[in-house]
Image (cartoon, rainbow, N blue to C red):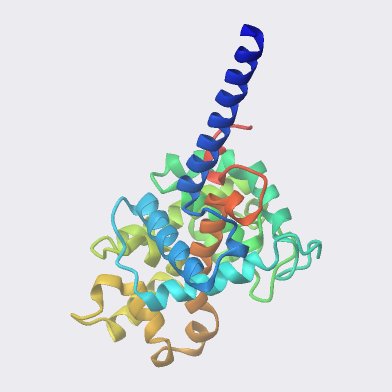
């Protein structure tokens, strides 16, 4: 009788631990059910909350993201979520997102170490190469001549002391990317959204980003400069409208998925937890 009672108590304890772990996971991810099963309102709330959490982790401050900018992020979250488990292989822009995040696990420890050494948020180091290359060290130049995991142009690599061949050295190009972001953070140090602007500058260029800010910022929208740029995209050049406007929302989207993998059905830990090989 005592033995049976002990077994029952042990089973009850195990069930309690399992339920506690499930509740803790739901709290950590901000999702009580998979993203793909959420209603539209639940997805909106989840993305808004997680975008602000990513911003806090990157900057140590609160980003005053507008509802419109959060909606831009959500569109990219939805886009990537639809590709999770689609079994489309490595097709660029259409392939199975699971493969991308699996590659991310392999390079995460190195990326975290390098960006931390440059006093740049590891989240930037982790998710910048995802939107640039899907963590693939691309050997063939794209239409603009960019190569490598961080998609440096040769002239930009030269500015940071890298030869064309060294652009294909992932560790050296990661360090150069961290220095590039550092320069952007210094350039926009007085802006509460300096991290987002540094990311935009990586895609658009610091001078062009600064010029765009001068054109669109005013006393009403300056608390969220990146939001203001997106809202005023029709007033900016064609490159901004077709490419640059999507860069920062896309970054937030892949970071939200990568930091909440199990909420999206990915069987791994947040990429930021891979400081050492698991």
Q: Report the front residue among 114 and 56.
A: 56
Where in the figure is residue 271, as x and y percent of width and height? 57, 45
Q: Is residue 237 above or below residue 247?
A: below
Q: Report the front residue among 182 and 243.
A: 243
Quadrant the N terminus occupies: top right
Q: Residue furthest top?
A: 2
Q: Report the front residue among 278 and 186.
A: 278
Residue at 62% in and 71% down: 79
Quadrant the C terminus occupies: top right
Q: Residue furthest left?
A: 219
Residue at 51% in and 51% down: 125
Numbered marks: total: 0
Q: Is 1 situated left or right of 244 in this image?
A: right
Q: Is residue 71 visible?
A: yes
Residue at 69% in and 60% down: 97
Q: Is residue 274 above or below residue 253?
A: above
Q: Is residue 230 above or below residue 152?
A: below
Where in the figure is residue 139, as x and y percent of width and height? 74, 59
Q: Residue furthest front?
A: 1
Where in the figure is residue 19, as x and y percent of width and height? 54, 37
Residue at 25% in and 71% down: 223
Q: Is 216 situated left or right of 27 in this image?
A: left
Where in the figure is residue 15, as x and y percent of width and height? 59, 31
Q: Is residue 66 above or below residue 187?
A: below
Q: Is residue 146 visible?
A: no
Q: Report the front residue among 224 and 145.
A: 224
Q: What is the quadrant of residue 83 in the picture?
A: bottom right
């Amino acid at each position: 009788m005592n033995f049976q009672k002990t077994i029952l108590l042990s089973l009850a304890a195990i069930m309690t631990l399992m339920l506690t772990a499930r509740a803790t996971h739901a709290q950590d991810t901000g999702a009580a059910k998979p993203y793909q099963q959420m209603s539209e309102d639940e997805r909106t709330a989840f993305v808004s909350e997680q975008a602000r959490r990513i911003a806090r982790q990157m900057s140590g401050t609160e980003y005053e993201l507008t509802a419109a900018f959060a909606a831009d992020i959500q569109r990219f979250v939805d886009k990537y979520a639809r590709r999770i488990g689609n079994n489309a292989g490595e097709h660029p822009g259409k392939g199975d997102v699971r493969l991308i995040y699996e590659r991310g696990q392999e390079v995460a420890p190195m990326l975290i170490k390098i960006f931390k050494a440059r006093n740049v948020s590891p989240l930037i180091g982790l998710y910048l190469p995802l939107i640039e290359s899907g963590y693939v060290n691309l050997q063939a130049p794209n239409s603009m001549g960019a190569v490598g995991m961080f998609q440096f142009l040769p002239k930009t690599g030269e500015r940071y002391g890298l030869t064309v061949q060294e652009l294909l050295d992932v560790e050296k190009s990661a360090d150069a990317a961290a220095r590039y972001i550092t320069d952007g953070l210094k350039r926009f140090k007085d802006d509460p959204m300096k991290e987002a602007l540094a990311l935009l500058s990586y895609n658009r260029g610091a001078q062009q980003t600064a010029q765009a800010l001068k054109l669109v910022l005013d006393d009403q929208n300056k608390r969220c400069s990146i939001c203001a740029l997106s809202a005023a995209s029709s007033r900016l050049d064609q490159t901004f409208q077709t490419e640059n406007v999507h860069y920062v929302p896309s970054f937030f989207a892949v970071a939200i998925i990568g930091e909440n993998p199990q909420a999206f059905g990915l069987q791994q830990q947040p990429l930021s937890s891979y400081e050492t090989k698991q």
